[in-house]
Amino acid sequence: MDREFESIAVMDFGSQYSQLIARRVRELGVYAELFDCHKGVDPVRAAKPVGIILSGGPASVHEKDSPTINAEILDLGIPVLGICYGMQLMAQLSGGEVVPSPHREYGRREVELLHVADTPLDGLSGTLDTWMSHGDQIERLPDGFEQIGRSDTCPVAAMANRERHLYGVQFHPEVRHTPKGMDILRSFVFETCGASGYWTMDAFEEVMERRIREQVGSSRVIGGVSGGVDSSVMAALLASAIGEKFTALFVNNGLLRKNEQEEVAKALDEAGVKLEVVDASDRFLQALQGVVDPEDKRRKIGHTFIEVFDEVASQHSDADFLAQGTLYPDVIESTSFKGPSAVIKTHHNVGGLPEKMKLKLVEPLRELFKDEVRELGRKLGLPEALVGRHPFPGPGLAVRILGEVTAERLSVLREADAIFIEELRHAGWYDKVSQALAVLLPVKSVGVMGDARTYEHVIALRSVDTWDFMTADFSPLPHDLLGRVSTRIINEVKGVNRVVYDISSKPPATVEWE
């Protein structure tokens, strides 16, 4: 991110909450960016942040090869807030002593606040409800640090060095289980760091459209759209920035939801996007013939998409740039970014295509989280039905069909899924749940229809509630709603005689079945 927006640097030590810290800061109107803790002090210094946050992490500061930072980061003259592991590391690097705790703290804990004036906890008093998750604790504070919070079993639940503007909390202010957590982050960002808070989607749109025009000049740009939120918002932004110099290519892989091609084409046309539709559904089905393994499905679909898109793109020989809907989490997940963490996945937007086609990349959304992309889409005039739609996997319905993907099985699932979503919308539940889907199982079951024995398909319904998709609970949908969905599917979708509802949480189950 160039310096058009003031920023907070989040040093990532592998915590599952690192991205959440950045999102919380952005919710306050200040840009936040994750930094690999292994990259040293230079990238942070170059970014010129107004503040630094040291994330939590699963390691102990005593472990061999535990993640750390160059202690110079604490001496840049920039305010620093250490969270959990980040506080312990700050204490250790500053000459304090961290030891294994005789009483580990996990979950809700009460913290007594002490002398919090002129710290990020200023304005709070008495006791603070917090969320903790740690096995080590600070035994001896470094010189110049003061205890400003304690719990029954953790003598240093918060600390401060006011002279150096270094602060630490043993709990997690970024999670909703710490009710006053946003107050603490707000105080750190605005009072301690002096941020002004002008990271808004209005400002981002203005800056990004200017950047796009500067980057592409008079060149033409092509970009793939899938019908999902990310690529649709990317297309609308490019069209707004450079008009007809951008062409969106929509490859119908035959794995889409009911009426998806028509709905997406209409929405993008109304947003002023020049759209070219390519029907390659037969080609994808042929590639998936006999394929059962989920990862094989993904590979076949990915390779086929690259081939088809490359062929279509070659017809636009005057294009010099490829636009992609890459988001910030895609960038993070596709690199060994999280120092101590393993690479999660290679995202389809952060690999193969650009090198293969020799096009220069335009990725205008790569600094945004999903909720920010939705907000931008609304500002660009995209309909809520598109911007607010539930997540949909890149391989489409192929990974919601357990077993081989055929035209007949796709038709069954497509109709069942459409009924489920339609009934959720009619009942006012679609926007209450985080993601809903139907799955076609690789089994058949015995039934009775019209006094005759049947042996037909089974559909599983899945709906989850979550705020970060790292964990999820099944949605408590009303029984009468589930009953209507089941009745309609069995009556209207030929070949289905049984509907079940998935009541698994994540973990151990995932949201998708494959």
Image (cartoon, rainbow, N blue to C red):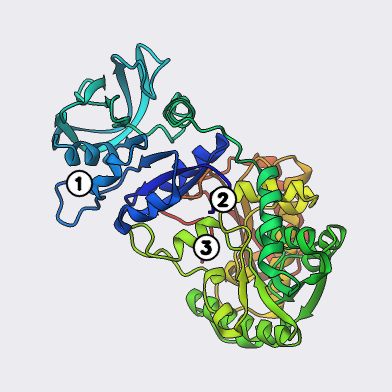
The reply to whether dot 2 and dot 3 touch (C-beta < 8 Å) is: no
What residue would you read off at disc 1?
A: 60
Residue 482 visible to an observer of this rendering:
no
Looking at the image, which residue is at 51% across and 67% down?
A: 514
The reply to whether dot 1 and dot 2 touch (C-beta < 8 Å) is: no
Looking at the image, which residue is at 74% across and 39% down?
A: 428
Q: Which of marks 2 and 3 is in front?
A: 2
Callout 2: 10 Å neighbours few (<14), some, many (20+)? some
The percent coordinates of residue 75 (x first, y second) are 28, 40
Res. 40 mark:
none
Helix, strand or loop status at disc 1: loop
Looking at the image, which residue is at 78% across and 64% down?
A: 242
Q: In this view, does 431 lie above or below 363?
A: above
Res. 513 mark:
3
Tell me which label, 1 or 2, sits earlier in the chain. 1
Identify the amino acid type marked 1: Ser
Looking at the image, which residue is at 14% across and 37% down?
A: 95
Identify the amino acid type marked 2: Phe
Identify the amino acid type marked 3: Trp
Helix, strand or loop status at disc 2: loop
Callout 3: 10 Å neighbours few (<14), some, many (20+)? some
What residue would you read off at disc 2?
A: 369
